[in-house]
Amino acid sequence: MKPKDLITTGVITLVLVAGVMAVILLTGDSDLFLWAADLFGKSPGSLAGQVVWITGASSGIGEELAYVLAASGCKLVLSARRRNELERVGQHCMDEYKMRSEDVLILPLDLLQFDTHKSAVDIVLTHFKKIDILVNNAGRSQRALWVNTSFEVDREILEVNTLGPLSLTKAVLPHMVERKSGHIAVVSSVVGLMGAPGLGSYAGSKHALHGWFDTLRMEVFEDNIHISMLCPGPIFSNALKFAFTGKSGEALGVDMEPGERRMTTERCAHLCAVAIANQLDEAWISLQPELSYYYLNQYMPAVARWAAVRIAGPRLQKLKEGRNDLHAS
């Protein structure tokens, strides 16, 4: 083949590859590594038989993840503060996915009661003898402008979203180190990668998780322990009912608007399970156009920061007006 023909063939190949990648990026609902894992990697069924402890399992992503893992043949520890809701989720796992009662441990847990975490680990180990995967999912969202958020709320969000998962992980970690095996998944958020108007304290708490757990990944690599940071974007759930506002002791108490541009909780849970099954270090889970902006923030951060302050206006105005449909189409 002549040099000119080689060059032409190479250019055409590059254009085709770029076109395919662009289509995947613009139509996908996850980053490219997670997209590839979902199509070609291990399925959640590869986790069959493993003991998975999920916090925040009484609703939202945690509840749906429990169903995905139950269908995959995992043994489950379900934790949250509301025992009745945990029992509902556990019963559904047994009824729908034919799980044995001894393979579903209902373990009420308050992440803010740090001194109870070690005893909770002991209960799990007594029941199952091991913990293969810990999913730090529990947490609370927020909706308030920076200037209207009290310092007390800042502190409370850090305790729930950051210190709670840290405390529980520190209680579980010695067991995993002793076994030379384990996987810790942390449900962060895309605002753990970049800020967003009205989510200042929430974003700060999620950013902090990345600092701690990215460090832990390096420290426990030789112990065969994996760390996965799961970063969902806007998801349909009941998160806004319990979200912090700017005032301590107050919950937002609103429902998400049906017409908002959000991913279903079921789809998010499936992608979380795929990321865990394939031991991905970090996974972005979001619809467009947010997903493209995360890529911009990753590879051209200066441009992303320049754009962010200029396109935040409509969302900021909605917040000032007290509106909640921030992701309306």
Image: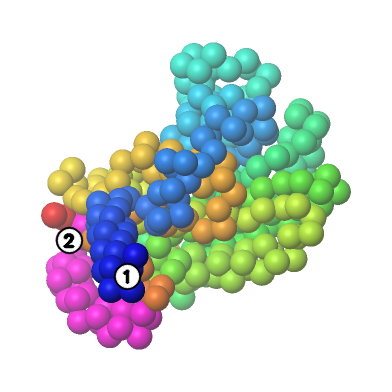
Q: Which residue is drawn at 33% across and 54% down?
A: 286
Q: Which residue is more in the foreground, 311 or 29?
A: 29
**x, y percent for residue 252:** 31, 55
Question: Mark 1 = which residue?
Answer: 2
Q: Which residue is more in the foreground, 259 or 286?
A: 286
**x, y percent for residue 117:** 71, 48
Q: Give the range drawn in magenta.
A: 300-327
Neighbours of disc 1 within 10 Å: few (<14), some (14-19), many (20+): few
**x, y percent for residue 312:** 22, 75
- Closest to the camera, between mark 1 and mark 2, is 1
Residue 69, can we see it? yes
Above or below: residue 121 compared with residue 156? above
Describe the element under mark 2 as helix, strand or loop: loop
Image quarter (top left, top right, bottom left or bottom right) of the N terminus: bottom left
Q: Which residue is more in the foreground, 255 or 62?
A: 62
Q: Residue at x 48, y 29 (%)?
A: 67
Q: Which residue is drawn at 44% across and 48% down?
A: 36
Neighbours of disc 2 within 10 Å: few (<14), some (14-19), many (20+): few
Question: Mark 2 = which residue?
Answer: 323
Question: Distance between the Cα atoms at labels 1 and 2?
Answer: 64 Å
State whether the magenta stretch is mostly helix, strand or loop: helix
